[in-house]
Amino acid sequence: MRAIGFITCVLSLWSCLAFAQAPGASAPQAERSSSPDAQARLQGVALVRALRAGGLVIYFRHTATDFSRNDQSMRSYDDCANQRLLSEQGRADAKAIGQRITALKLPLGSVLASPMCRTMEHARLMFGTATPTAPMRERTEPNQYPGLKRLLSERVPDGSNRWMVGHGTPFRAVAGAPHLAEGEAIVLKPTGDGWVVLARLAVADWAALPMR
């Protein structure tokens, strides 16, 4: 009798395990993070609707540049002759993104750019205007960009967005990996003391966003 009882118990346990692993069986769901870095990604129509509703920060790393030049000899932010500048592809990409943003009827609000020549040119090609904003690239100590972090975190009124064109290294220092590619944008919902990532958009992704 003891042997029969033991076998019955083992079979019962095996049945429970098999059910738990069955395709239709329900399983405990992982708790969703509520931290400012939670990856709540939007795509397609849902992303366009969120962008139209506003209240978001859209941060771009400048589009493609000419890496045969560098910034080592620059004397000021206006010294474009001694800075790395947008390539012809970068200029074309910035214009195309701006045209798509207009076609999608996305609200603007403020347009901020790092005062470097390549970021200002990207912003102006995309929107026709930009406010040079030094805190986007000013570092207080290694990997500390408090001005950029504040601008990414500050809430934005509904019906408006904060568009920013900056650099990859300061953004990575503030937000962590992965590093933004040239022309890549990240869409954030600011929370006042941080943000939630809603989407990442490569240059080609803008053309794929639906008009409806």
Image (tube, grey):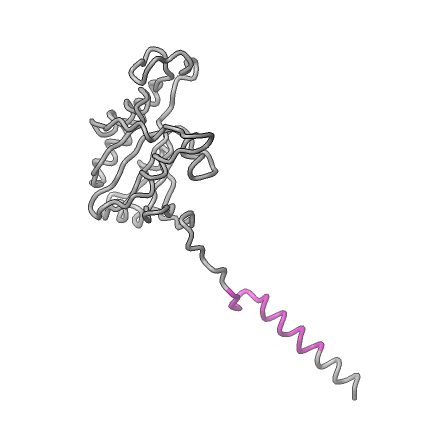
Camera-nearest residue between 68 and 105: 68
| Residue 40 on image: x %, y % | 39, 50
Q: Position of residue 151 (x, y in %)?
A: 31, 38
Q: Which residue is drawn at the image coordinates 38% and 45% (left, top)?
A: 197
From what the image shows, is residue 19 above or below residue 4? above
**Of residues 114 and 207, which is closer to you in this image?**
114
Position of the N terminus, as image quadrant, is bottom right
The residue lying at 34 percent from left, 20 percent from top is 86
Determine the residue positioned at 31% across, 13% down.
79
Region of the chain picked out in magenta, as a range = 10-28
Quadrant hosting residue 92: top left
How many numbered circles does the render carry? 0
- Along the line of sight, which residue is nearer the eye, 147 or 46? 147
**Is 55 one of the magenta-colored residues?**
no
Q: Please tell me in which quadrant of the rendered image residue 56 appears.
A: top left
Percent coordinates x, y for residue 13 in the rendering: 67, 75
In this picture, is 87 found above or below 175? above
Residue 152 lies left or right of residue 11; in this view the side is left
User: Is residue 36 left or right of 115 when viewed as pictured?
Assistant: right
Which image quarter: residue 65?
A: top left
Closest to the observer, 199 or 191:
191
**Is 44 above or below relative to 10?**
above
- Secondary structure mainly formed by the magenta segment: helix
